[in-house]
Amino acid sequence: MTQEIRTDVSGSVWKVFVKPGDQVKSGDILFILEVMKTEVPYEAEMDGEVTAVHITEDSGMIEEDTLAVEIS
């Protein structure tokens, strides 16, 4: 089963901590968005392997419901 991590809000990508092939555990922080000068971390909801990362730190502003990371 693949987990898709999508953004809840629009914001700027501040930091990406994972790349394809990385092993993650539930609760690991995958990336952080900056939303109105507030850092919003996004966590893995399951253990698994990162299969795709669709955002980068130079992505600029991304919209709500953007597919950011896939884990399987």
Image (cartoon, rainbow, N blue to C red):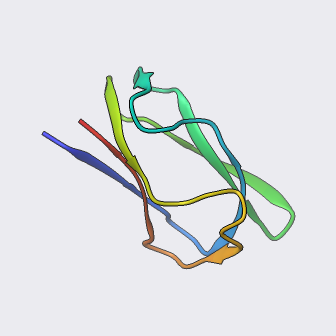
Q: Report x, y in % for residue 8.
A: 50, 65
Is residue 58 shown left or right of residue 47? right
Q: Residue at x 50, y 38 (%)?
A: 19
> Total of numbered circles in the picture?
0
Which residue is located at x 72 percent, y 64 percent? 58
Location of residue 9 (image quadrant): bottom right
Q: In the picture shown, does residue 44 fall above or below 35? A: above
Comparing 31 with 22, the one in front is: 22
- The residue drawn where x is 54% and y is 36% is 18
Q: Quadrant of the C terminus?
A: top left
Q: Is residue 3 above or below residue 25?
A: below
In which quadrant will I find the N terminus? top left
Residue 24 spot, x, y in % from top left? 43, 23
Q: Image check: 2 left or right of 64?
A: left
Instruction: Give me the residue at 61% from left, 75% from top.
Output: 10
x, y percent for residue 40: 68, 52
The x and y percentages for residue 31 are: 61, 45
